[in-house]
Image (cartoon, helix red, strand yellow):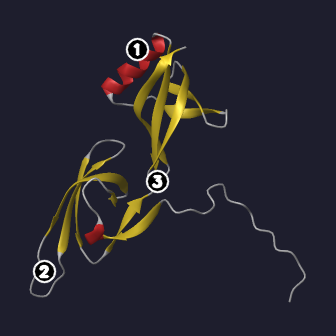
Amino acid sequence: MSDEEHHFESQADAGASKTFPQQAGTIRKNGYIVIKGRPCKVVEVSTSKTGKHGHAKCHFVAIDIFNSKKLEDIVPSSHNCDVPHVTRTDYQLIDISEDGFVSLLTESGNTKDDLKLPTDETLLAQIKDGFAEGKDLVVTVMSAMGEEQICSLKDIGPK
């Protein structure tokens, strides 16, 4: 037995993986999948029958959750696919800066200033108009695989 103490450097994300494996045959519509390194939401799944020598194959049609591009992939149903850890967090909107960044209030009372306004035109207009009218807005931020983006907004009443 050794008497010396071991010191480990702490990691901010606790070494958590950005994705987890899941068998392709168990991924369903409205689930998430990583296609070509991008986190996507599955919009269509079709499974082909096994061939003479092969596996049943799953054909995924999915939409990138950040840039809304359509991606497709075909994977044998017995193989594992990467599934992204997708989280949604609500923050209160404090300010919109001139350069297109937003200032958000976190649960702990700190500010988060590293997010840009969304690229979606209707959501962008809703946020800017609501903020200009002085409404209390809560934005929902979706994060997956180290990327974050504002995906929706709620009005919690006047200030």
- Of the image marks 2 and 3, the number of the one nearer the N terminus: 2
Element under label 2?
A: loop
Q: Which of these two is toward me, 103 or 136?
A: 136
Q: Is residue 125 above or below residue 105?
A: above
Q: Confirm or deny contact between disc 1 and disc 2 (CB under 8 A).
A: no
Question: Which residue was labeled with disc 2?
Answer: 50
Q: Is residue 7 above or below residue 32?
A: below
Q: Residues within 10 Å of mark 1 (few under 14, many from 20)?
A: few
Query: Residue 130, percent across and down?
Result: 43, 16
Question: Which residue was labeled with disc 1?
Answer: 129
Picture residue at 66% right of the left edge, 54% below the top: 12
- Of the image marks 1 and 3, the number of the one nearer the N terminus: 1
Picture residue at 13% right of the left edge, 80% below the top: 50
- Of the image marks 1 and 2, the number of the one nearer the N terminus: 2
> What is the C-alpha distance between the residues marked 1 and 2?
54 Å
Tag 2: residue type? Thr
Q: Is residue 79 left or right of residue 13?
A: left
Query: Residue 56, percent across and down?
Result: 17, 77
Mark 2 vs mark 3: give the one in front.
Answer: 2
Task: Name the quarter where the N terminus is drawn.
Answer: bottom right
Element under label 1?
A: helix
> What is the C-alpha distance between the residues marked 1 and 3?
30 Å
Q: Is residue 1 above or below residue 33?
A: below
Element under label 3?
A: loop
Tag 3: residue type? Met
Tag on residue 145?
A: 3
